[in-house]
Amino acid sequence: MASKLWASRAASYFRISIFHRGFATVIKDFKYADTHEWVKVDGSSATVGITDHAQDHLGDVVYVELPEVGTAVTQGGSFGAVESVKATSDINSPISGKVVEVNKELNNSPGLVNASPYENGWIIKVEIGNSEEVKSLMDSDQYSKFCEEEDAKH
Amino acid sequence: MTACGTRNIGPPLINLVRLKGVPILRQLHLEERLLRTSLDNWCIINDGTDDPTVVMGISGKPVELLEIDSVIRDEIPVIRRFTGGGTVIVDNGTIFVTFICNKDAVPGLQSYPRPIMSWSSLVYRKVFQGIGEFSLRENDYVLGNHKFGGNAQSIIKNRWVHHTSFLWDYEISNMGYLKLPKRAPEYRQARSHLEFMCRMKDYIPRSNFISRTIDAVGSHFLVRSMELEAIMYNSGTKFKPSSRLLRKQELEEAKFDSQTSIAVSQSLQM
């Protein structure tokens, strides 16, 4: 119980929601796509990665195919892929814009996507093309509910 | 709901395309195009390919996976395919079976690697019922503890592909082009290629395997046969497949880079 209380307090401090029923974590201020990518908006820039739910369902990531810097991304369009368990899975951008940075650490340590999906496992940084698009994404509560419903259907 | 107000029930439709001896690169291009541009479900069976060809997964590094000197010397084609997974050497003794499906095609199936892999094993369990001790073991199809089929997948937003190369027969000498992979399943237990694998021909006639596979597909889908010519090259679809043949220069550069790296490493230790 004490460790759960500590975890809840730590979670609250770091603004992470932990669901003790074994559901995946979400970050309160991020936005989420229904294809399980997250975006952290910071003015006209954004950081994109895949969610804890996604990495858990995909399995151990052994390779990340990164786009070139300068590539245009469109909302809902694929920009790269992760490889896990003999599968390549597309990564889709939650927003439109231009790739300004990719996480080169993933070339040597693709497992960062599993170990730290919301921090060290970030995938691309984007110069946002249309900030209105963020409004169409889910917030953390909506995304958590979405994941619950999706898992319940299968 | 249809215009008459009646619900459309019954299994989903799948288009069955039977090929024989089609080059594996052409098959991969077809698969990727159907994955990315079609809205239908597909089952493709290619009964053997032509010349022996090495096929690596999307992240495959030739220097780690291949005996490059032999591959270059014998001019064995090396392909990097669009799906994940490991390295195989395929020839006319290989039978390929591919499923390309919409994510909602199989009721209750989540389009992630493990559920799709698990579902596929249900299909082949039916194929091998009464024939051999079939199971899915760490993502390989095995008879007993011998691998006879290699799997790989690609999953996009609303569709997925799961394809398998089945070793109906193989040339022992061809296995010499492949190194023992660094990433190997635990059940392999460091066995050599020959000790690890088995030939399907020791269990089932070739045509039997294909007909039983089609029957098993029919227990999940409504199967509609389609000729390859009917689906080739829709000129309105501009699609560039990513599976490609590696150039000889790339293999030579990989070999050179590896030798350079070893030499530098050795000189640093002196």
Image (cartoon, coloured by chain):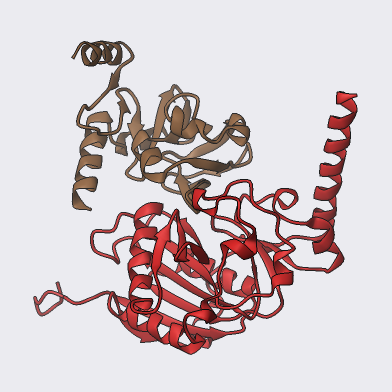
Chain colours: A brown, B red
Q: Position of residue A40 (x, y in %)?
A: 41, 26
- Write the residue at 34% across / 77% down: B129
The reply, left or right, for residue B209 in relation to residue B173 is: left
Instruction: Name the residue at 35% across, 59% down.
Output: B118
x and y percent of residue B196 in the render? 57, 61
Q: Is residue A22 left or right of residue A104?
A: left
Numbered label tally: 0
Seen at 27% across and 31% down, the residue is A139
Q: Is residue B152 left or right of residue A17?
A: right
Nearer-the-camera pick, B255 or B174: B174
Question: Is A47 drawn above or below residue A81 in the view shown?
Answer: above
In depth, the one of A43 and A34 nearer the eye is A34
Residue B7 x, y percent position in the rendering: 12, 74
Above or below, comparing residue A153 to residue B263 in the picture: below
Among the 4 quarters of the image, the one containing residue B247:
bottom right
Determine if residue B241 is in view.
Answer: no
Query: Where residue B31 appears, x then y in whole percent?
Result: 52, 70
Compare residues B211 and A84 and report the one nearer the observer: B211
> Relative to residue B28, is residue A77 depicted above or below?
above
**Residue B3 as seen in the image, left or right of residue A101:** left
Residue A119 seen: yes
Check the picture and name the quadrant holding the N terminus of chain B. Answer: bottom left
Q: Which quadrant of the rendered structure holds the C terminus of chain B?
A: top right
For residue A65, what is the image quadrant?
top right
Task: Identify the residue at horizontal 41%, vertical 47% (top origin).
Answer: A76
